[in-house]
Image (cartoon, rainbow, N blue to C red):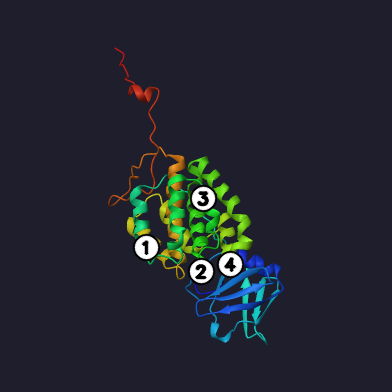
Amino acid sequence: MREGGVRIGHLAFAALAAAGRGRVVSVSPRVVNVVLDGVALVGLLPPGAPLHPWAIVADFAPLRLRAGMCAAVTRGRLGLRLSLGERDRMRLALAKRDIVRLALDGPLRAWPAPAVWAAVRAATDASVEPWGFASGLGPALEHFAASAKPDGLDHLVGRGEGFTPSGDDALVGLLAALASLARLDARVGALRASIVALITPRLDIKTTRLAAQLVAAAAAGFYAEPVLTLFAALSAPCPAGLERLAAAARVVARMGHSSGVALLYGIDAGVRAATACASPTACTRPPRCAGPRPYAGEARRCRRPTGERARGPRRRHRRG
């Protein structure tokens, strides 16, 4: 994919391919939201903005658009064309080669060391507390992190303000953390499945359209680019240091007005809950790498030698 060209999340492309028309519902310098056939909402983002599964990043002039304009989707052999406004005031050619599938590359292979999550929490603590956390969201996450029980997490759906309320953003981060750790212990995967079953019935009735789509995408394993970058830094076999992880956490914290901070709160709660329910036994010795001592981003499982290895090397006797 060419840098600076059109990029589109695979869920947004699928919604456009299934739609025939829509309308612009809101316009700002940061995003233009389009509802397709009254069902799915797709966001048009300017160049440099982080992509999420329901977004399109393209070079366009949002000031030429206004709420209420019509949107039309036409299909071609190589992709789609999105036209906005009267007389096609803006047209976007969306080729299949521009689709980005925003899924986690793979789960973490070892439990993160405490120093790793200290860097993530530092980025969270240095940011402004998101809207709504003072009204019960923070205590709900703390209770879940300590007990590893999903009771009450369904009340986070729709809690907060904006297109994506803080409670929904926290649930996205929580689901991402549990998905990354599910391979290490079956109980973590079962906990995540119970949370998805608990919150899914409330998405269509308790929160905004975009928030419901993003939480459902997270339940299916798809997340925004900064979240994937953060977990890629965590899963690196031999990270360069905590600076890379802290930088990735700061990028997440800057997402939206408060969405990024809420995501980090949810990620932190998810990791602590997974640790509480699984009680990992892996040691936290860092891998051997060239250069300075890295943080313990990947632990090695300690195994007691058995057989001849436990008794020591076998001696060879020379024949006289």
- The amino acid on which the numbered mark 2 sits, given as a three-letter code, is Glu
- Quarter of the C terminus within the rendering: top left
Residue sitting at the far left: 292
- Please tell me which of labels 4 and 2 falls first in the chain: 2
Task: Determine crowd level at label 3: few under 14, some 14-19, many 20+ residues with C-alpha closer than 10 A.
Answer: many
Question: Where residue 22 appears, x then y in whole percent?
Answer: 68, 75
Mark 2 lies on residue: 161
- The amino acid on which the numbered mark 1 sits, given as a three-letter code, is Ala
Is 313 above or below relative to 255?
Answer: above
Q: Nearer the viewer, mark 3 or mark 1?
A: 3
- Please tell me which of labels 3 and 1 falls first in the chain: 3
Q: Quadrant of residue 279?
A: top left
- Quarter of the N terminus within the rendering: bottom right
**Helix, strand or loop status at disc 2:** loop
Is 177 above or below relative to 99?
Answer: above
Q: CA distance from mark 4 to mark 2?
A: 13 Å
- The amino acid on which the numbered mark 3 sits, given as a three-letter code, is Ala
Mark 1 lies on residue: 247
Q: CA distance from mark 4 to mark 1?
A: 27 Å
Mark 3 lies on residue: 179
Tags 3 and 2 touching, CB below 8 Å? no
- Please tell me which of labels 3 and 4 falls first in the chain: 3
Is 201 above or below relative to 315?
Answer: below
Task: Determine crowd level at label 1: few under 14, some 14-19, many 20+ residues with C-alpha closer than 10 A.
Answer: some
Q: Quadrant of residue 62?
A: bottom right
Q: CA distance from mark 2 to mark 1?
A: 27 Å
Question: Where residue 14 appears, x then y in whole percent?
Answer: 65, 65
* Residue at x 61%, y 64% (from the top left corner): 11
